[in-house]
Amino acid sequence: MDRVMLSRTLPAAAAALVLLASALPALAQDDPVLAKVNGVEIRQSDVALAEEEAGGQLPAMAPDAKRDYLVAFLSDMIVVAQAAEKQKIADTAEFKRRLAFNRNRLLMDEMLQKEGKAAVTDAALRKVYDEAVKQMGDEQEVRARHILVETEDQAKEIVAELKKGANFEELAKTKSKDPGAAAQGGDLGYFTKEQMVPEFADAAFKMEKGQVSDPVKSQFGWHIIRVEDKRKKPAPEFDAVKAQLETYVTRKAQADLVTKLRDSAKIERLDKKDDAKPADAKPDAKPAAPAKK
């Protein structure tokens, strides 16, 4: 990807920020100046911003090469932007509309990030986690082994062998047509009722721990099932779902903020005057009664 193509992936806001760089006060020493283009400084923070805006569009390269690439891109952007300034493009109505749009979008993004970040506290995460655990209720899980064969006669033969004392796990390894479970002695691990086909699930969840089923037919063939354990489905550990909780809390806080601001704003749809009335409009007055003659 060349720098011209990359420029199409970066919004006009990035260009505006670079153009304003010369007017900003001196930055901290940990944000060094990497280059100057016609007097405009390109700092490490500018390079970081360009990389952030590019996202996954950058080609794979070593860190030094990436920095050189981005500095060159920013240099190109500055010289082209300066040329545009000379042609008074910044004074056009179209440019001003785009600049205002990008400014609003950047302000929105920053506000939502701030709101989301503030909402992610340990107390908030724990509250969502505890509520989710309560909603799980008493959903049950079964741990079972099975032997899968093609015909009912084969299944009956296996049941007969088991009644004579044959080892279930060894039979699963040698005779089951389910290669994944067979290697584990037919072990399917823990599962909920919804995770299995109905015929298999109905049989497994009706059985007691240690019980072996009669042949059960499903779309996959004939099963002989042995229930190893039954339990209430455990909740996932907090740390295992912490990232998902953070995402949920962040998005909810952002959505709540938008809803609150929207509800308190005066929003008028001028293109739909006939279809909708302003939220604060009063009901139409009742028609006056006809005058008596």
Image (spheres, grey):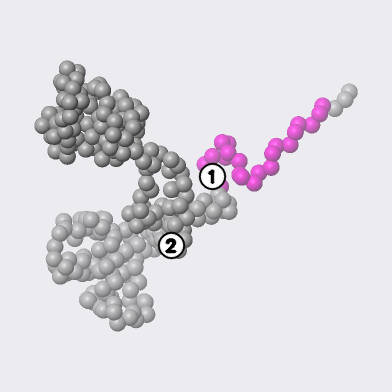
**Where's residue 199, x and y in %?**
30, 24
CA gap between label 1 and label 2 equals: 41 Å
| Residue ID for mark 2 | 122
Q: Residue at x 33, y 60 (%)?
A: 12
Quadrant placement of the N terminus: bottom left
**Does label 1 or label 2 sit earlier along the sequence?**
2
**Numbered range of the magenta stretch:** 268-290
Secondary element under disc 1, as helix, strand or loop, is loop
On whether residue 183 falls in the magenta region, the answer is no
Amino acid, disc 2: Asp
**Where's residue 18, x and y in %?**
31, 69
Direction from residue 130 to residue 5 in the image, left or right: left
Quadrant placement of the C terminus: top right
Q: Compared with residue 266, is residue 34 higher up or lower down, i.e. above or below?
A: below
Q: Determine which of the numbered discs, if any, sits on residue 269 in the image.
A: 1
Direction from residue 70 to residue 249 in the image, left or right: right
Q: Nearer the viewer, residue 69 or 19?
A: 69
Amino acid, disc 1: Arg
On whether residue 288 falls in the magenta region, the answer is yes
Q: Residue at x 28, y 34 (%)?
A: 210
Q: How many marks?
A: 2
**Where's residue 243, x and y in %?**
35, 56
Which residue reaches farthest right?
A: 293
Q: Main secondary structure of the magenta part?
A: loop
